[in-house]
């Protein structure tokens, strides 16, 4: 592809997501669960820096305790992108140094690792002038994690299947209070539980949209089918749901452990934040309608 004019990208956002609801509607023969959910981007997350190298190595320059570089989704995603680049263009692109500033708790259901990987795919595709489309990057990321395609998609979405089928959806503009109760919830332990509900009745995107108009967006649609299992297995999650539930419709995101509640404005959320027990980590985040990296790279849902 010739000389790469842009050598680095700094402070690339990797926002968290919330599952406004999460229904398990079935299970495939290969064991994967069929889901329906609305994924909501929020303006709180990790940040990544990228710089092209003089060789072809993918190097994570940040130390992340408990996450060896070889198993990091960011490193694995960029190696897949590098291989796809070579197949497409007939030569290896430059290597990349990757720095990661972690703010999102691991095992929290906020999609942190997947969001980091998606930001890496989008940013480095841009740095390399690789020319992969949004759909191609979504397909590249899916084998690594079911949430990666959503973050590459870059819009709030009604998600189905194992996480690969999505439609853009309008979501309420509001402020979320998120509580991290200080534990990691292994996703596998939730999906393997015998008492997990796996037969929720399928809903339509229009059902969700109609609910927003009647409930002003703050009373949640549906429920999180994983929450009953997580609160049984992990008492801190149950405690967070119960505590935050005194102030609104509190529910768990993803497979846990984080719990959230929507508020009409930041002042209302901050009033509750001031009362959160000090043993928990908590933060406030506004809803986003699009991935902030799209604007940073000056693209509109189509990767360049």
Image (spheres, helix red, strand yellow):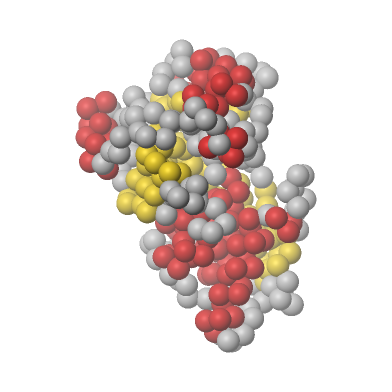
Residue 194 location in percent, x, y? 52, 30
Name which residue lies at 38% across and 62% down.
300
Name which residue lies at 47% across and 64% down.
139
- Residue 13 makes an appearance in the image: no
Is 34 rendered above or below residue 260? below
Name which residue lies at 64% across and 39% down.
106
Q: Nearer the viewer, residue 68 or 227?
A: 227
Q: Describe residue 28's horizontal placement relative to residue 167 as left or right.
A: right
Quadrant (top left/top right/bottom left/bottom right) for the N terminus: bottom right
Residue 199 location in percent, x, y? 37, 34
Q: Nearer the viewer, residue 294 or 59?
A: 59
Quadrant (top left/top right/bottom left/bottom right) for the C terminus: bottom left
Residue that lies at the very extreme toward the top in this rendered image: 246
Residue 230 location in percent, x, y? 55, 27
Q: Nearer the viewer, residue 51 or 224?
A: 224
Is 51 rendered above or below residue 160? below
Residue that lies at the very extreme toward the front in this rendered image: 29
Name which residue lies at 52% across and 76% down.
130
Q: Nearer the viewer, residue 160 or 18?
A: 160
């Amino acid at each position: 592809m010739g000389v790469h004019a842009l050598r680095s990208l700094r402070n690339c956002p990797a926002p968290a997501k919330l599952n406004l609801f999460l229904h398990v509607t079935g299970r495939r023969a290969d064991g994967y669960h069929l889901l329906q959910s609305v994924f909501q981007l929020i303006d709180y997350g990790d940040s990544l820096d990228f710089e092209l190298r003089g060789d072809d190595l993918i190097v994570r320059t940040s130390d992340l305790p408990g996450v060896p570089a070889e198993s990091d989704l960011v490193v694995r995603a960029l190696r897949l992108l590098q291989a796809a680049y070579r197949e497409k263009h007939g030569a290896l692109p430059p290597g990349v140094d990757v720095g990661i500033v972690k703010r999102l708790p691991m095992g929290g259901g906020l999609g942190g690792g997947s969001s980091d990987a998606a930001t890496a795919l989008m940013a480095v595709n841009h740095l390399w002038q690789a020319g992969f489309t949004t759909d191609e990057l979504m397909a590249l990321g899916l084998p690594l994690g079911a949430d990666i395609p959503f973050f590459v998609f870059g819009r709030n979405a009604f998600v189905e299947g194992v996480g690969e089928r999505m439609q853009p959806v309008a979501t309420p503009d509001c402020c979320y209070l998120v509580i991290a109760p200080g534990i990691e919830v292994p996703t596998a332990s939730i999906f393997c539980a015998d008492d997990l509900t796996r037969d929720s009745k399928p809903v339509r995107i229009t059902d969700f949209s109609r609910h927003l108009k009647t409930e002003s967006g703050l009373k949640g649609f549906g429920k999180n089918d994983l929450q009953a299992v997580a609160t049984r297995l992990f008492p801190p999650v149950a405690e967070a749901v119960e505590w935050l539930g005194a102030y609104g419709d509190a529910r768990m995101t993803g497979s846990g452990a984080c719990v959230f509640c929507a508020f009409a404005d930041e002042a209302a959320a901050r009033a509750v934040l001031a009362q959160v027990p000090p043993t928990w980590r908590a933060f406030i985040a506004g809803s986003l309608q699009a991935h902030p990296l799209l604007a940073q790279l000056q693209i509109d849902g189509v990767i360049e």
